[in-house]
Amino acid sequence: MLKYTLKRLFQSLVTLFIVLTVVFLLMRLMPEEGYFGEGYEKLDVAQREAILTSMGLRDPLAIQLKNFYASLLKGDLGTSIIYRPKVPVAEILKTKIPYSIRFGLAAMIISLVLGISLGISMARSKNRFWDKLGTGYIVFINAVPAAVYYLFIQLYVTDIFNLKILYHPKIPSSWILPVASMSLGGIASYAMWIRRYMVDELNKDYVKLAKAKGLKNKSIMVKHVLRNAFVPMAQYLPSSLLYTISGSIYIESLYSIPGMGGLLVDAIQRQDNPLVQALVLIYSSIGIIGLFLGDILMVTLDPRITLEKKEGAR
Amino acid sequence: MTNSKVILSVKDLVVKFNLRGRVLTAIRETSLDLYEGESLAIVGESGAGKSVFTKTFMGLLDGNGWIDSGSIMYNGEDLAKYKTEDDWIKIRGKEFAMVFQEPMTSLNPLKTIGNQVEEAVVLHQGLKGEEAKKAVIEILNDVGIQEPERRYYQYPHEFSGGMRQRVVIAIAVACKPKVLICDEPTTAIDVTIQAQILKLLKNLQKKYNLTIIYITHDLGVVANIADRIAVMYAGDIIEIGTCEEVFYNAWHPYTWALLSSLPQLGVKGEPLYAIKGTPPNLFNEIKGDAFAPRNEKALKIDFVKRPPYFDVSPTHKAKTWLLDPRAPKVEPPESIKALRRQWKGEV
């Protein structure tokens, strides 16, 4: 297990290295306005060249790449130019990340708890009331674009319960709707998958044997079926959780929450190259970490998956 | 056999299923007495209702099936009246345990073998911790698993099919049941291992004082292990008797047909015998003897009135009008006659 984890960790690092390099090289193709901020038009060609040279952007690519990794290892993500001029990217993120993580964590916990419970009760009452109600909910959430029900919630539900239409740090009740809206999708997808895999598992022979053994339905669910139903979800569960806590573009802009969600769109629109580079770096790392954790989780849950050759294995 | 105690008595059991709005009668007024300590084999072709019949003893019918009428008396209680899970928990494992057909999928792939046997030990023997583990290792040893201490920590995928069936048997035995129902225990297993598994079951029967019901369509298996044979056709036991009686002195035309289709009884150079037609459609009400439409020598009354049991001997009875004193003499096929002669010669 340890050997596998280390091997897999090494693979993740290699992938991350490749992704970062590609991102870095792509960023070099971006229009150069992104390095100047306001007043780009007023500069003449010589002045522009001087600035670019002073930023190290006229060095050979290999040197630029080396410098990029050197400063990355020191934790330096570069300095924002347009979004908040002359402020280090790390500092911008420091103010944004806590919001996203707080909202994301709350939404994640709610969607996991409610989604899994809904999925289990749907599987248990297959084709009866709960199942039909749940299926209706899942179909609704998947069929209606998120932006539509997000807006609906923001406009009408705030009215009904007399809640604030925008997020305000000093008012705790202004948390409720953003978190609830963010959870809706998660609840639906976790419920759908858990139900699906549990129904699959409930028809398996080992469930019949467990029943014949004299186990109660509840213990069969908890001790046998649930873990089996989790295995196929294990792979992508960490990724989906990580993306939840990394911020939602829609929700954060709707409720004007100063989180990470809208930042990437903003940075791209305003062509703040160093900020874009740092954000892409962060999101791709999250993706790679999610896959890594998914693999580890899957191996922990299912003894049949070893992914390494054992001595004398069949 | 008749001296020992009846531990399970089924009377006129009717089991129905609802399939897409249509009602199917799977078990048609079937009766059976099971004696303590015996091995009873229930034989019959696929769909005859063998599995469904025994599943009713443990409340394991699928959700769309129900007991329509009749009784299943066990220990002075009528199991046919049981409705809730709490009722059945008293029976499952403790009184009846089951060995399933499919060893490859009967075990939970994510739990160790030891863990799965231990569940039964904890549930039915009330042992905990080290004691439970010791009991598990003893049972694993009993079912012929080598190095049980090491195997205890292994997962099902590390076992072969035959070995997994041994584990399934270990789980059943660990429940300390009175009656063990083996639903085609060797069908999915390599022929070379089948005999071993049957021998194992025989040994366990002695060691744990089990009454065993074998469900099978393999008459070769039956001959090896059963004390009595019940022949099932279209949801009813049409003939029941000791192993010798049913093999050598069968009376029901279906039993004749079944025996005639054994390759061992075929005549060299001639094509193997096969029963013509298909079993009746259980969605329809069956009139008379269910086998009559496939029976070339059927009597007129076979199509009109369902035959009751006629006793051939105190241990042997069959549901066929041929045993009625008024019936015309119908000759059984040549191979069956040969068997009868052989038997009389022996006796």
Image: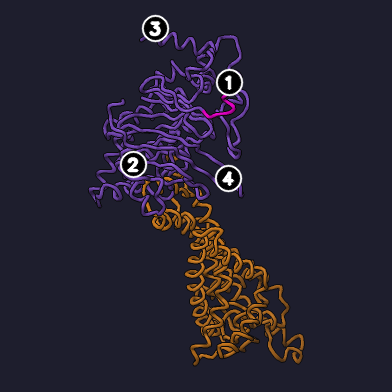
Chain colours: A orange, B purple
How far is the residue under mark 1 from the one under mark 2? 38 Å
Vertical order, A306 against B307 (above or below): below
Circles 1 and 2: CB atoms closer than 8 Å: no
CA distance for labels 2 and 3:
40 Å
Counting from the top left corner in percent of width and height, residue B336 is at 50, 13
- Closer-to-camera residue (A170/A187): A187
| Residue labelled with disc 3 | B345
Question: Does the magenta stretch mainly form a helix, a strand or a loop?
Answer: loop
Marks 1/3 same chain: yes
Give the residue number, with chain letter if any, for mark 1: B299
Q: Secondary structure at mark 2?
A: strand
Q: Give the residues drawn in magenta, as a range.
A: B299-306
Amino acid type of the residue that numbered disc 1 sits on in the rendered structure: Leu
Looking at this rendering, what residue extends furthest in the left direction? B131
Q: Amino acid at mark 3?
A: Gly
Where A258 falls versus B340 (above or below)? below
Label 1, secondary structure: give it: loop
Image location (x, y in percent) of residue B314: 35, 22
